[in-house]
């Protein structure tokens, strides 16, 4: 339609069609954070599967699972996030879509994991929000670069 053009005072000016460095930087940030978040989820999952007494629950919560179940959830989620993060660097559109969806799932899983390890859960939620924002605001720009 009017891609690459701006209309200022009735005059059409051609803008640069190349994506900005900032946009590419934010998408690369999202990819790096997805790889990092994937490693974090994998480590937390392995710890919970190998030593189920490591995480201590302080109160009764709505999302009450055994520590081993949480470990497997973290392990599977971590592998998906990790591969999606690597796929994002190749400019794969599916990796970007999976990144947004898994970012939402990761944020909700981290929220449900709050009673087990609150500091890590809050960190996971913050990184998930940053990933979702980066991929929805600037995700297409790394594909065009």
Image (spheres, rainbow, N blue to C red):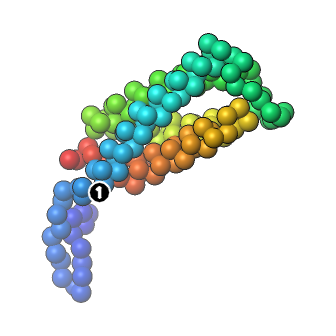
Q: Residue at x 18, y 56 (%)?
A: 18
Residue 116 location (% of width, % of height): 71, 32
53 displayed left or right of 1 = right
Residue 9 location (% of width, % of height): 24, 87
Residue 36 location (% of width, % of height): 43, 34
The image quadrant where one finds the N terminus is: bottom left
Observer able to see residue 112: no
76 displayed left or right of 18 = right
As drawn, which residue projects farthest toward the bottom? 9
Residue 76 location (% of width, % of height): 54, 22
In-front residue for pair 78/119: 119
In-front residue for pair 26/16: 26
109 displayed left or right of 61 = left
In the figure, residue 120 lies in which quadrant? top right
In-front residue for pair 111/118: 118
Q: Residue at x 42, y 40 (%)?
A: 33
Observer able to see residue 2: yes
Q: Above or below — where is 56 with respect to 107?
A: above
According to the picture, the residue beneath numbered tag 1 turns out to be 22
Q: Above or below — where is 3 with respect to 127?
A: below
Q: Residue at x 20, y 47 (%)?
A: 145
């Amino acid at each position: 339609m009017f891609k690459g053009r701006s209309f200022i005072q009735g005059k059409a000016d051609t803008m640069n069609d190349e994506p900005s460095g900032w946009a590419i930087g934010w998408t690369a940030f999202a990819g790096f954070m997805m790889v990092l978040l994937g490693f974090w989820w994998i480590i937390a999952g392995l710890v919970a599967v190998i030593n189920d007494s490591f995480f201590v629950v302080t109160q009764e919560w709505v999302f009450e699972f055994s520590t081993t179940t949480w470990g497997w959830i973290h392990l599977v989620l971590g592998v998906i996030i990790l591969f999606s993060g690597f796929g994002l660097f190749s400019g794969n559109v599916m990796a970007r879509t999976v990144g947004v969806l898994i970012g939402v799932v990761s944020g909700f899983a981290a929220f449900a994991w709050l009673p087990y390890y609150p500091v890590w859960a809050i960190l996971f939620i913050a990184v998930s929000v940053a990933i979702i924002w980066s991929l929805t605001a600037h995700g297409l720009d790394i594909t065009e670069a």
